[in-house]
């Protein structure tokens, strides 16, 4: 699949597919700390708030959105404006096929082009696939926050990783 995945800027017309991919994981996985499904209206607001400052990408395979990635504001204060936080989600039936690598590699390139200084990843410390993806692209472990999240009746450690651009 990797050779035929096309990574493009996300468009408003992609928000339904992006939301479907994300919402699949909300009730089924602790890869997101979200506990409530995200409405399409909220996703559209997110799109319009991000599109001028932070890249949002989709991976297409045979005209279908099979994954997405974005950068977002890391912290609200102005001094943090050169650091962004990444998100990468791949449709469940397309995982382990290079989609995440294609998305994250392109996202890092976009961050460099926008003059960012670093990208931070906030990942469930048990999610070896996501940790491995980020390490493959050059992210390094910088912190472990013990029991930072609580989902599905258990405490979840969160690993912070960072890539200096």
Image (cartoon, rainbow, N blue to C red):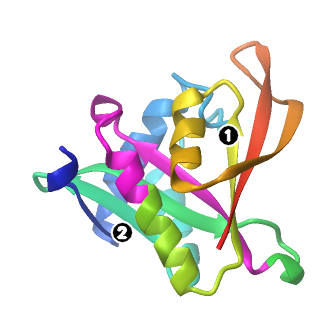
Please say if 119 is above or below 109.
above
**Residue at 35% across / 34% down in the picture?**
95
Numbered mark located on residue 1 in the image: none
Please say if 33 is above or below 68.
above
Q: Could one spot residue 5 in this view of the protein?
A: yes
**Residue at 46% across / 42% down in the picture?**
22
Left or right: 104 with respect to 71? Answer: left
Mark 2, Cα crowd under 10 Å, few <14 / some 14-19 / many 20+, is many
Residue reaching furthest to the top:
153
N-term-proximal mark, 1 vs 2? 2
Numbered mark located on residue 10 in the image: 2
Residue contact at pointers 1 and 2, CB within 8 angstroms = no
Please say if 16 is above or below 113.
above
- Magenta stretch, residue numbers: 81-103
Residue 9 point in image, percent of width and height: 35, 73
Report which quarter residue 165 is drawn in.
Answer: bottom right
Residue corresponding to mark 1: 123
Residue reaching furthest to the left:
62
Give the mark count: 2
User: What quarter of the picture does the N terminus occupy?
Assistant: top left
**Residue at 57% across / 86% down in the picture?**
114
Judging depth in this view, the residue of 123 and 27 nearest the camera is 123
Residue 38 point in image, percent of width and height: 54, 46
**Residue at 83% across / 76% down in the picture?**
80
Please say if 32 is above or below 117.
above
């Amino acid at each position: 699949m990797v050779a035929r995945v096309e990574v493009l800027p996300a468009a408003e017309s992609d928000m339904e597919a992006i939301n479907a991919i994300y919402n699949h994981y909300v009730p089924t996985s602790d890869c997101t700390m979200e506990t409530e499904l995200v409405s399409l209206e909220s996703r559209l607001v997110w799109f319009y708030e991000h599109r001028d400052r932070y890249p949002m990408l989709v991976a297409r395979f045979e005209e279908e959105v099979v994954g997405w990635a974005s950068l977002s504001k890391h912290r609200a204060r102005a001094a943090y404006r050169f650091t962004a936080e990444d998100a990468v989600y791949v449709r469940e039936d397309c995982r382990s096929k290079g989609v995440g690598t294609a998305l994250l590699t392109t996202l890092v390139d976009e961050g460099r082009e926008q003059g960012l200084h670093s990208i931070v990843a906030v990942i469930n410390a048990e999610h070896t696939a996501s940790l491995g993806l980020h390490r493959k692209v050059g992210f390094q472990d910088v912190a472990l926050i013990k029991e930072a999240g609580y989902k599905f009746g258990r405490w979840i450690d969160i690993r912070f990783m960072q890539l200096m651009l």
